[in-house]
Image (cartoon, grey):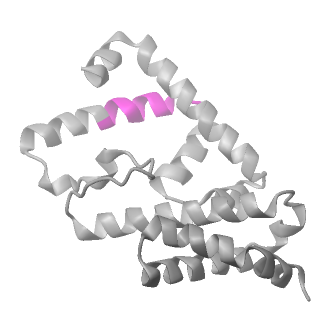
Amino acid sequence: MSKIETVYEQHNRSIYYLCLKLTKNQAEAEDLMQDVWMKVVRYESYLENVDHEKAWLTTITMNTFRDKYRKDVRRSKHMVVQPDQLDVSILDLIAADTLPIEDQLAKADVSELIQKKLGELDSIYSKTVFYFYVKQLSLVEIAEMMKVSIGTVKSRLFRAKQRLRELILNDAETAEMLLV
């Protein structure tokens, strides 16, 4: 039996129950489960370096669910109630063309300010933020692309957000516009 078959046998049930808990629907849970295991097969080479298989699988499951949820919301073009278990910003759930013109202009100003502050980040952090939030690549895909570990990608995202917060709070004009 191969390593991936062993992992599947050991964790198949718990991952399925997690999928079911996230989706609250058997058919969607099965679809999510299939997507998760396809990613596991695609990134099988990482499996050799994983210390905690269940944690790794749980992370893949959560990221796959978030990605799928974001795609569905963007496709629907409707604002929906945000589930408690997601840490998706509510702004991600609002289609840009449904905002009143004043809000669209304010959002454009905010976007411009944030892009300016992103430009002040070190290039390694701004690239990581770009891949994760703009290109919406998974942590595994970013790690593979940047030839670093997943932990490094997570660390860079965390540090980039911290640094961005500092840059915004230290600039009175930007802080006033974003915190009002």
At horizontal 37% and vertical 45% (from top left) the residue drawn is 89
Work out whether 166 lies above or below 64: above
Q: Is residue 93 visible?
A: yes
Tell me: 42 left or right of 75. right
Tell me: 39 left or right of 100. right
Quarter of the view holding residue 38? bottom right
Q: Pick out the residue farthest to the bottom.
A: 1
| Position of the N terminus by quadrant | bottom right
Tell me: 135 left or right of 73. right
Count of marks overlaid on the render: 0
Q: Nearer the viewer, residue 55 or 142?
A: 55
Work out whether 101 lies above or below 35: above
Quarter of the view holding residue 98? bottom left
Work out whether 72 lies above or below 31: above
At horizontal 41% and vertical 30% (from top left) the residue drawn is 116
At horizontal 60% and vertical 40% (from top left) the residue drawn is 157
| Position of the C terminus by quadrant | top left
Residue 49 spot, x, y in % from top left = 88, 61
Tell me: 150 left or right of 2. left
User: The magenta stretch spans which residues?
Assistant: 111-121
Residue 160 spot, x, y in % from top left = 58, 33
Residue 129 spot, x, y in % from top left = 54, 44
Does the stretch in magenta take in 98? Answer: no
Work out whether 82 lies above or below 7: above
At horizontal 76% and vertical 80% (from top left) the residue drawn is 8
Q: Nearer the viewer, residue 136 or 72?
A: 72
Give the main secondary structure, helix, strand or loop, of the magenta stretch: helix
Q: Is residue 124 visible?
A: no
Residue 158 spot, x, y in % from top left = 61, 35
